[in-house]
Amino acid sequence: MRRVETLTPWIHRAVLMMSTLAFVRIGLRHILDPVGAAAAVGGTLNATMAVTTARVGLGGFPIAIALFNLTCLMSPRRRAAGVRLVAIVAFTVIAVRLYSAVVDGGAPQSTKLFIPESVILVGSVTGLVLERARGGRESQGSPAAIKIEGP
């Protein structure tokens, strides 16, 4: 059990660091060069509103998730919450990618992305399972774990 207690925070840190870096990279690519990012996958942005929408939707949201992950990475009490968010995002992205493969057909570039997304999902789930096995000590003390008793 001691090994689990030592390993869990490191898994959480690794998951949060990997996902933070990935989201920063994705976000900056779409904020700094949305037209180039779209062209790299065969898309075009022909209107100012299309460019702005790409910057916000494909750049802003990943940066926001990266910033949340970074704040969770810096606080032991918040790491499990950050890892939960990463697991939810990774699961959702994989599910949508699978749906797209069925509906639109598989694309080799898209299929390659299953590997890092799956690694992040497996790491997240592993960290959360180990956290639960050790009694959730890393997340104790968070506002959600504090009981407020009434009169």
Image (spheres, grey):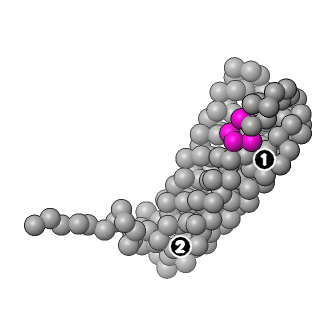
> Which of these two is toward me, 85 or 30?
30
Seen at 31% across and 68% down, the residue is 146
Q: Is residue 11 left or right of residue 23?
A: left
Seen at 79% across and 35% down, the residue is 51
Kind of element beneath mark 2: loop
- Where does the image place residue 12, in percent across and percent down from the top left? 58, 66
| Residue at the limit of the structure toward the left, as seen here | 151
Seen at 58% across and 66% down, the residue is 71
Q: Is residue 139 left or right of residue 14?
A: left
> Which of these two is toward me, 48 or 123?
48
The residue identified by callout 2 is: 75
Q: Is residue 126 above or below residue 26?
A: below
- Where does the image place residue 150, in percent across and percent down from the top left? 14, 65
Identify residue type, mark 1: Ile
Identify residue type, mark 2: Ser
What residue span does the magenta drawing correspond to?
53-57
> Which of these two is toward me, 140 or 144?
144
Q: Residues within 10 Å of mark 1 (few under 14, many from 20)?
A: many
